[in-house]
Image: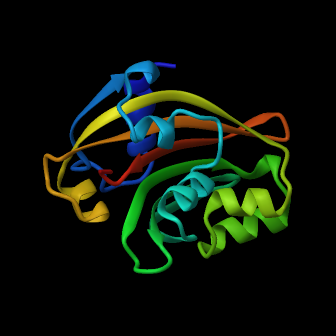
Amino acid sequence: MNPTDELRRLTTQIPGNEDLFQSAEHVSSSLTPEPYKQMLVHEHHMTVTMEKYHGCPVNVKVLNEFSDGDIYARQIILTRSDDGTPVQFGIVRFDFQYVTQQVKDEIKSGQIPLGRVLITHNVLRHIDLGAIMQFKAGAGLAEALQMEEGQETYGRLATIFCNRHPAVDLLEISRPLE
């Protein structure tokens, strides 16, 4: 996978993402600074990782979505359940042909984070970490994560295999961490 090409493919899936980043750079997993390394360099759902790191459940807020047959894409933020602070920005592209109608309906409802839906429905899944990225926030990302424009943060590109098929492509960006 070429991280730059994959990032471009995911961000152009949904219109209005032209100003998300001032820059985006691939970073080796081994050179990812803490605490981003523990947040991003793993093969677990970010929903669970964010909840553990922030010490509370997270809620999902769908900012924009697109659907074409079995292909569903959405742009989201995860927020802390206790105070509503955004903790993660994400873009998801899901091929629904590999999950049940119930899973598809629950994801499209936009009420529960994707990872939680897959875990709850016991979907056989494997997460393949594609690349770690360092971002300088553009106006769009800064607004979504309530951070300064130009401020640095880290994220990841990953693929979730559902029932042994590559079903979900992800861009997951953490709000800046201390």
Residue at 53 percent across and 66 percent down: it is: 55
Vertical arrangement, residue 11 with respect to residue 114, above or below: above
Indicate how the structure is coloured in the image: rainbow
Quarter of the figure with residue 124: top right
Viewed as shown, does residue 56 lie left or right of 135? right
- How many numbered dots are placed on residues in this image? 0
**Residue at x 39% of width, y 50% of height:** 174
Q: Please state if 89 lies on the left or on the right of 1 as rendered.
A: left
Please tell me which residue is depicted at 81% across the width and 46% down the height of the picture: 98
Q: Using the image as rendered, state which of residue 63 and residue 31 is in the foreground.
A: 31
Tell me where residue 137 appears, x and y as whole percent: 21, 47
Is residue 139 toward the left or the right of residue 162 in the image?
A: left
* Residue 22 x/y as whole percent: 17, 40
Residue nearest the viewer, comparing 99 with 41: 41
Q: Whole-percent x and y of residue 82?
A: 47, 80
Report which quarter residue 48 is drawn in. bottom right
Q: Which of the two residues, 92 or 154, is positioned nearer the viewer here?
A: 154
Q: Is residue 122 visible?
A: yes
Q: Residue at coordinates 70% horizontally, 52% vertically from top-left?
A: 70
Instruction: Decide if residue 62 is in sight here.
Output: no
Residue closer to the observer: 67 or 103 = 103
x, y percentage for residue 155? Answer: 40, 40
Q: Is residue 143 left or right of residue 57?
A: left
